[in-house]
């Protein structure tokens, strides 16, 4: 008989909310709420909390053992969560055909009815892996144990290993995967971000919601939760934060940097090269790939089309023939969009004219970008505004007035417009990049900002991420020496992969700005800090004076600021020299 195990990811050293797994919401720690929800489902044979070997996560193990002795704890690698899951299945003696449900400790409102529906669908479809698109916080993913073991052997991608299941979604063609729509069974994905806890604002919002719904005293339906959020969302949301969803991925304040691999026309008119570039973007860890689309008759006058174009990067005798050689048709764009989606990466486009917008609407791309040169192309902006989809605008040739005019057409009050600082120089000089302009753009227009990079290295893009860019765009190429004017200034695979990893690592260092004692340094503090120690032998009956004190490690005793607790007190016993002093030694 197939065994079913619930594995819950939990750790204390969250990047945005330290110690969140054991933070109480209305008196119940977050992790306990997840355990309670799983037990209520009456579905799983085993529940195991998968945490790390860090000392900082010792409290998780202790808390779980104190709370429910039937719940097991497995401790493994801190960053390689995929390996942690694999080893946890071995710890539970699970076989390859057994089933794992992946839960996380930051989702306190897992729903029994929805989870059972996902489970039944998994059985009916005989899937290897079943998930709700966008990974709903209301129900877990279901994964065959054999797939976890296989992924642990095959993938070396840091993102895949940290997040466990992206490998399956990227390689969907190799497995029997059931992907349930974002709005499946009444789910309203727009509210997902209010049902998870990753920041103090989210924690306060969830706590208020659970109180209002009397969640801990009655069965609360998903419909009731959505009705509450619909009516009270303004009291939960952080009004100062700017956020937008790009193809279901939240982008903006307090969100990971959204990295766009700009393919543009570095495919050189070849679908096969384009697919290789998509593969490169996926393997590097980008969020999206971007192409360009031009309707050449709408772009060029006859004179411009027929102008001779003779240079090492030309793909035709005239400029028009050159441009036509680099264009992909509708069917080719459709093929590439489907290929990108199958690889688990978003496909979007910069259309440079209205016919190209119409084509991309037929392909249902999720959002658009406006090239710097088209910021003053107001008819194009009007058509893009009518799509109702998010728009990213580049400003490499723009004045503030140009941007203002563009926003007047696109909709200056819209929150789903992102403005990228850019310099339209190919390649761009570092001293011209002007990353501080991102702050100016945000303060002037109140929009999410980012950076589109045309420099030859990765330092500008990395610096932009540190300075707060929500979106970073970088041109990519298979080889800088390839024919074509953009290749030389683009990033090859190794360089692009490093950029994305550096961006992730750099953001980890920023923190939340709160200066507090990090649990990870507590052992060092206890070992190296100073305690009050007897400087000389102290006889019983002696009144202690400051001259009898010194400070030495370890820091497990009284601190210097606490000396008043013992100075002037009488020793109850003989105290040797060089002993850590305690209050109970004195009367």
Image (tube, rainbow, N blue to C red):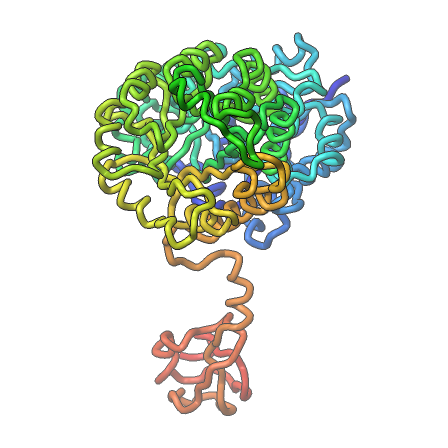
Give the x, y percent position of residue 438: 32, 44
- Count of numbered labels shown in the rendering: 0
Quadrant of the rendering where the N terminus is positioned: top right
Give the x, y percent position of residue 139: 53, 21
Image quadrant in which you'd find residue 516: bottom left
Q: Is residue 35 visible?
A: no
Q: Is residue 128 left or right of residue 180?
A: right
Give the x, y percent position of residue 518: 47, 57
Q: Is residue 230 left or right of residue 520?
A: left
Q: Is residue 138 above or below residue 496?
A: above
Residue at the spot x=58%, y=15% of the render?
332
Residue at the spot x=52%, y=91% of the render?
537
Q: Is residue 256 above or below residue 523?
A: above
- Tell which of 63 and 202 is nearer to you: 202
- Tell which of 384 and 346 is nearer to you: 384
Give the x, y percent position of residue 203: 38, 37
Image quadrant in which you'd find residue 483: top right
- Tell which of 91 and 87 is nearer to you: 87
Q: Is residue 489 left or right of residue 451?
A: right
Quadrant of the rendering where the C terminus is positioned: bottom left
Q: Is residue 520 above or below residue 395?
A: below
Q: Is residue 420 above or below residue 184?
A: below
Residue at the spot x=26%, y=33% of the render?
403
Q: Is residue 48 visible?
A: yes
């Amino acid at each position: 008989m197939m065994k079913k195990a619930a594995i819950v990811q939990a750790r204390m050293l969250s990047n945005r909310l330290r110690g969140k797994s054991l933070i109480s919401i209305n008196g119940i720690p977050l992790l306990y709420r997840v355990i309670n929800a799983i037990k209520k489902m009456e579905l799983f044979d085993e529940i195991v909390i998968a945490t790390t070997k860090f000392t900082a996560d010792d409290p998780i193990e202790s808390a779980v053992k104190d709370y429910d002795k039937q719940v097991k704890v497995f401790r493994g690698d801190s960053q390689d969560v995929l390996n942690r899951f694999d080893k946890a299945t071995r710890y539970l003696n699970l076989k390859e055909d057994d089933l794992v449900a992946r839960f996380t400790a930051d989702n306190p409102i897992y729903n029994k009815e929805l989870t059972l529906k996902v489970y039944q669908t998994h059985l009916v479809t005989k899937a290897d892996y079943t998930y709700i698109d966008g990974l709903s916080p209301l129900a877990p993913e279901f994964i065959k144990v054999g797939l976890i073991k296989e992924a642990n052997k095959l993938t070396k991608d840091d993102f895949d290993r940290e997040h466990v299941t992206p490998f399956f979604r990227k390689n969907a063609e190799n497995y029997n995967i059931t992907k349930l729509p974002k709005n499946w069974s009444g789910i309203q994905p727009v509210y997902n971000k209010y049902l998870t806890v990753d920041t103090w604002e989210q924690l306060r919002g969830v706590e208020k919601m659970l109180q209002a719904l009397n969640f801990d005293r009655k069965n609360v339906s998903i419909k009731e939760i959505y009705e509450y959020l619909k009516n009270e969302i303004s009291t939960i949301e952080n009004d100062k934060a700017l956020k937008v969803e790009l193809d279901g991925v939240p982008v903006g304040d307090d969100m990971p940097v959204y990295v766009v691999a700009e393919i543009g026309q570095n495919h050189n008119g070849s679908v096969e090269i384009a697919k290789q570039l998509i593969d490169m973007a996926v393997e590097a860890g980008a969020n999206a790939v971007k192409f360009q689309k031009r309707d050449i008759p709408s772009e060029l006058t006859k004179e411009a089309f027929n102008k001779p174009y003779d240079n090492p990067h030309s793909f035709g005798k005239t400029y028009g023939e050159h441009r036509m050689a680099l264009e992909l048709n509708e069917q080719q764009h459709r093929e590439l969009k489907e290929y990108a989606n199958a690889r688990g990466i978003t496909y979007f486009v910069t259309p440079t004219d209205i016919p190209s917008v119409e084509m991309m609407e037929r392909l249902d791309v999720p959002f658009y970008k406006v090239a710097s040169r088209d910021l003053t192309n107001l008819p194009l902006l009007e058509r893009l505004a009518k799509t109702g989809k998010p728009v990213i605008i580049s400003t490499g040739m723009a004045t503030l007035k140009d941007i203002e005019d563009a926003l007047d057409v696109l909709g200056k009050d819209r929150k789903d417009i992102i403005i990228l600082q850019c310099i339209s120089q190919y390649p761009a000089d570092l001293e011209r990049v002007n990353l501080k302009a991102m702050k100016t753009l945000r303060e002037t227009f109140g929009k999410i900002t980012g950076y589109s990079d045309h420099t030859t290295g990765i330092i500008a893009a990395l610096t932009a991420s540190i300075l707060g860019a929500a979106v970073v765009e970088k041109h990519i190429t298979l080889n800088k020496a390839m024919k074509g004017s953009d290749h030389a200034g683009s990033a090859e695979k190794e360089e692009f992969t490093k950029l994305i990893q550096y961006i992730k690592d750099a953001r980890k260092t920023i923190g939340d700005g709160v200066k507090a004692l990090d649990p990870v340094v507590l052992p060092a503090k206890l070992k190296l800090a100073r305690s009050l120690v007897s400087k000389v032998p102290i006889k019983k009956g002696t009144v202690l004076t400051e001259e009898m004190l010194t400070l030495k490690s370890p820091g497990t005793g009284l601190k210097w600021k606490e000396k008043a607790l013992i100075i002037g007190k009488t020793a109850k016993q003989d105290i040797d020299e060089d002993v850590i002093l305690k209050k109970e030694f004195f009367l």
